[in-house]
Amino acid sequence: MVKLALLLIGPGAFRRQWSVLAMIGAVFVVLALLLALDISATVTDLTYAALGLVFVGNGLIGGLMALCAPVGVDRRFGLAKAAVSAMVGGLILAAPFQSDWALAILFAIALIVDGAARMTSALLYRYSGWWGITLCGLGEVAMALMILVEWPLPADRNAALCVGLFLGLSGWLLLRLGFLLRTLEDEAAILLLPVFSNRGWYDNAPVLIGEDPPQEHEHPIIVRVWTPAGSIGAPERRPLIDRYLAAVDQNGVISTGHTALELSPDLYISHYPAVEIEHTEQSFLTTVSSKPENDVAGRFIGSYAEEVASWCEADACVTFRTYSQRRLRVYWAGYRQDNRYNLTNRNCSVLVAAALDAALEGVLVSDSPWSRLVRLLLNPDLWVASMIRSRASSMTWTPGLLLDYARALANIVERPEQSWITRLRAALARRRRETPSLDIVAS
């Protein structure tokens, strides 16, 4: 979350105050140690209460916003994330009062599920640094087993261990970001920092001379998405899989969907393999690896009209009016020098996600950056967007993930000053307008 918040606010103000960011990280690490060593019951209870309330509040607001989403928008992802956030917050709040064994089971299940997902995606996609993600997944599973067997810590320390680990990792990230911002050159994008560029997705992040504040433009950025299920004739329904990964038609042919980014009148970002890859269920697993041997020649489509003529209309789009046109154009100019295409590491969605991040750097720049940072960290849309980024970095960007990410970002950057009460009222009013009414005619 912190990484995405700093990206949207921009590194300028935080570069000058890098020591504050590092100091906050150090405080988080100290709190984590206090929890782990059980030195102060008061500190433990206050930490549980604060962290639990943040998670519960985030879940409740996120759930309300998902329920009030426009007609036609898939609300399952937002509701699932909101439910998980509220459940985690409830567990943290209940930690001092619940039975140790019940909490141990719940925490262990969460660790095993997350660890197994990380290991599976790393072993499947084999991207650069996949072994590190695999080790992290193994570590989560090992921690779950230690919690269940109550070794080396007793059962009453399980909750403290999990909360302390969360705080410690967050603190370490803040410490690292603080020191990295200290050495970041004024011309360099924050996306060039190692914490962003571990997959090589931001190698073309812009290095600009002179100021380039994002502003509202007459022509919006339009993110166009062909979801897997929406871009295939008669898909076999597979919930979530055909929304976020791939859809299969009745003949066994697989569609992974597509994404593109358009900025009128002359910029269109769309990456395809030069020779269309025909996917079947038997061959699909052999092509998802990010290894260089799966690289193929690619081609860049010139316009949306050209794509529609050769395929079909996109079934979803998201618009952004506030962005940095210069950063977007510089990123695209660098990326298109290499037309290599890789299904899981250099695909259409990876390109559009990175281009969108480049265009939105500093879009929420403020004279009070710390106040803006706190408000962002309490914004459920930022939590959703951050979780999507995390899942994409351990797997890959897909059209379904990118669509949800773009919608969350649009909620954040297009109306940053709008209160949650105002947003909820507007969403409820929109739902009432868009829900078809039933005319009852007396016979």
Image (spheres, grey):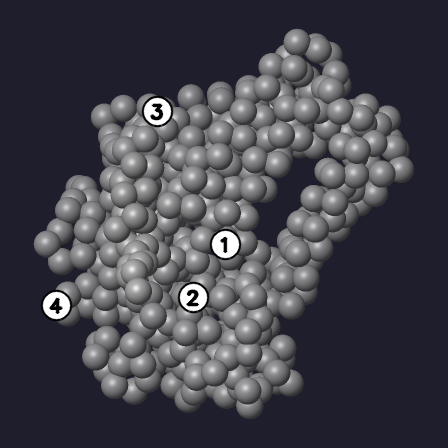
Is 151 on the left-hand or right-hand side of 197? Answer: right
How far is disc 3 from disc 1 in space, using C-alphas? 33 Å
Residue 289 screen position, x and y as percent: 59, 72
* Quarter of the rendering containing residue 369: top left
Q: Mark 3 touching mark 1, by CB under 8 A?
A: no
For this rendering, which residue is in front, 178 or 401?
401
Q: Which mark is residue 265?
A: 4
The answer for how far apart the CA atoms under marks 2 and 3 are is 33 Å
Amino acid under disc 3: Trp
Q: Callout 2, which amino acid?
A: Pro
How far apart in space, not on screen, are marks 4 and 3 (Cα)? 37 Å
**Pointer 1 with pointer 2, Cβ within 8 A:** no
- Disc sitting over residue 76 in the figure: 1
Q: Earlier in the sequence, mark 2 or mark 3?
A: 3
What secondary structure is marked by label 3?
Answer: helix
- The image position of residue 168, as x and y in percent, is 62, 29
Label disc, if present, on residue 370 of the rendered structure: 3
200 is higher (above) or lower (below) than 266: above
Q: CA distance from mark 4 to mark 2?
A: 24 Å
* Residue at which label 2 appears: 399
Which amino acid type is shown beneath numbered disc 1? Arg
Residue type at numbered disc 4: Pro
Mark nearer the viewer, 2 or 3: 2
* Mark 4 vs 3: CB contact within 8 A: no
